[in-house]
Image (cartoon, grey):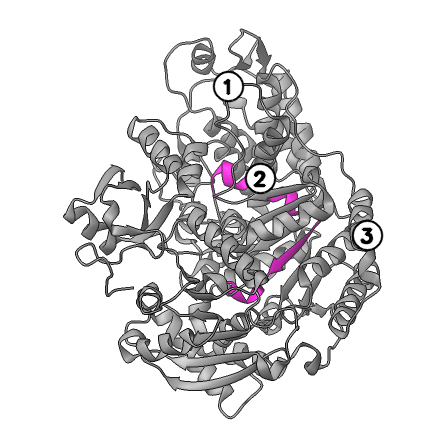
Amino acid sequence: MVLAHRAEDGRTQSAPEHAQNVAALCAAFAAPFGAEELGRQLGLAHDIGKYSAAFQRRILGESIQTDHSTAGAQEIFKYLGWPAAYCVAGHHGGLPDGGGKTDAASDPTLCGRLKRPVEPYADFSKDIQLERVLFRLPKILGSGGFTMAFWIRMLYSCLVDADYLDTEAFMRTSPPPRGSDCTMEQLFARLEASTACWNDPKNELDRVRSDIRRACLKAGEEQAPGLFTLTVPTGGGKTISSLTFALRHALAYGKKRIVYVIPYTSIIEQTADTFRKFLGEDAVLEHHANVDFGEDETGPRDPAKERKKLAAENWDLPVVVTTAVQFFESLFANKPSRCRKLHNLAGSVIIFDEAQTIPLPYLQPCVRAIAELTVNYGATCVLCTATQPALAPLFQTVSPDLNPREIAPQIPAQVFRRVRYEQLGQLSDKELAQRLGSHEQVLCIVSTRKQAQAVYSLLDGEGSFHLSTLMPPESRRAILETVKRRLKAGQPCRVVSTSLIEAGVDVDFPTVYRAEAGLDSLVQAAGRCNREGRRPADDSRVYIFQPDDAYTATLPHSLERPMDVMRSVTRDCPALDAPETIESYFTALRQFTGEAIDSKRIVPLFEDGVQDMRQPSFPFAQAAEKFHLIDQNTRAVLIPYTEEAKALADRLRGGERSRALLRKAGQFSVNIYEPHFNELRRRGALEVLEEDLAVLTDLSLYSESTGLALKADEGVGFFI
């Protein structure tokens, strides 16, 4: 018998059994986008290399290296060509670059591997019958290369998830706690029951929120699947309204999953908590780098936590709340662990919260990915924000039929006009601190961590707080809870923060100061002022100011351009948050940036891959390396400022490593740029455990009020 797997207890799984199981799963996963039979063939072929004598010796315990993926790729290539060969070749190591005709057998590209000699393997035809099958190609968008590469990645997702799942099912002695018994009918009923009291609004603001939610309910049922916008001013209840649309739409059109994509970890926990409150703990997966699935717990397994941990691998729960980084980087990844969840996006409702925050250097590839999901994979995609980024022209360059439909009704501007904007001109840090000190409750948002520390240091009196990414997530979370309590109790509360607080964080200040930035940032900052509309708009001021020249001169180029466009479109325009002003801003910004909306040239990399359709060459590995929504040139420093953080540091020093441990350590860590890291190391303030992991040893450089010092030799530094 040819073996595919052997468990620790001696049980074995035959290669034909594994191939048939994977084929059935892969076919089911690929069926929603018309590739069922192709998926079946991928599952049958993927482990043909295990029929080699070398692999059989290895599975029986011999310590030898074998490559079983290449043999399967070469076999499936004979029947189904390049797309299938990519998937099978990469089902363990990752989708390879295509390469070219001149590649040698030793090259890691697909072209190279198709030439590579493989271990002789036995005749598999009595167990596995490969066939040439007909399958439906996706609708071609653009030049076709991006579409074909996206399709291959989705097929790859089907294969690797099927392979993982069948292997997992065999290796475990009991069935894994996967999936959920919750139906969309049940979830919609839970939401309706939880929000029934909202149907009787008590004031004008609540009435308009109710109107928005009813519009979402109506559109969810009546509007056919496709691309939508949901434009709701801050404070309009867009989180629950968008969830209402998603659930009603899923129920009406048989959508199997809701994926909520959020730009910042600072608000993802807040949103996930809200969804769990309305829908139940069992239905919602919160998936991001900081979530704790309880993997380090001793004693009996917690089935609920294990279910969430397993669901994070392939998103098989009905509601997924994740980050934009996790979502988009997975769509451009090439490794099995990142890609296996992608097929579960087919036939889903995907809500992009704060859609305007998609970074400009990656805007075009992100738009192309959303277009593919909408046109070719049956997803309904919703761009949800208070400041729509005017992306319709970009979508229409991909396909003339991709014209986003607005869900929310037109709302009279005065209903959500909760603040009054006022331009102050340039303020020194001292002048700014004096103004902040004159308010009992005030929020000040600046663009650099340097200025946040400097202004905070000038504040006197009780109730002053500082927030920036130089503070660990656990510290920021604790401070935000204190801030919310003090605001609610009417106690003094003056906060100086970087932009981490301005999008979606549920705080309500009577007055906000915001350093000049892009228009979307100014409007988002205003959303932290008079959020619930309890005060007259004229008494709720948002002051826009220019920082000292020393700060503006060092701003990164990515911030300078939005500021320039903001000044241009808002000149002589008092209504900064008017829809027409916002649309003009984003239209001008996109035109101004030109090719910078795809600064790594991700889309051309794939579009150029179909110059020779007989041998399409897609740079999957290259693109995965290039596509990172946030800068990767930072390094983590664990701050052992609590007993829990000290214990984590000791475990890391002792050589312990696990995903769960590193995730917990991340709650007490800050990510800093290379010059800052090197300065701390030069001073001897760091114990470097690994290239990307260090522990701060000089705690005099850390303040629980302001976080890690920007300069190791002065305590407060002078670079961003």
Badge 3 density bin: few <14, some 14–19, many ≥20, Cα 10 Å: some
Q: Amino acid at mark 1?
A: Lys
368 up-or-down from 134: above or below: below
Which quarter of the picture shows residue 497?
A: bottom left
CB under 8 Å between discs 2 and 3? no
For marks 1 and 3, the one nearer the N-term is: 1
For marks 1 and 2, the one nearer the N-term is: 1
Mark carried by residue 192: 3
In the displayed structure image, the side of residue 4 where residue 567 appears, left or right: left
Magenta region includes residue 354 = yes
Residue drawn 82% across the image and 50% down it: 193
Q: In the image, residue 444 lies at what x, y percent?
A: 44, 71
67 up-or-down from 84: above or below: above
210 up-or-down from 673: above or below: below
Which quarter of the picture shows residue 27?
A: top right
Of the two numbered discs 1 and 2 in the rendering, the one whose residue sits closer to the viewer: 2
For marks 2 and 3, the one nearer the N-term is: 2
Task: Say which quadrant the N terminus sits in.
Answer: top right
Q: Amino acid at mark 2?
A: Ser
Mark carried by residue 50: 1
Badge 1 marks a residue whose secondary structure is helix
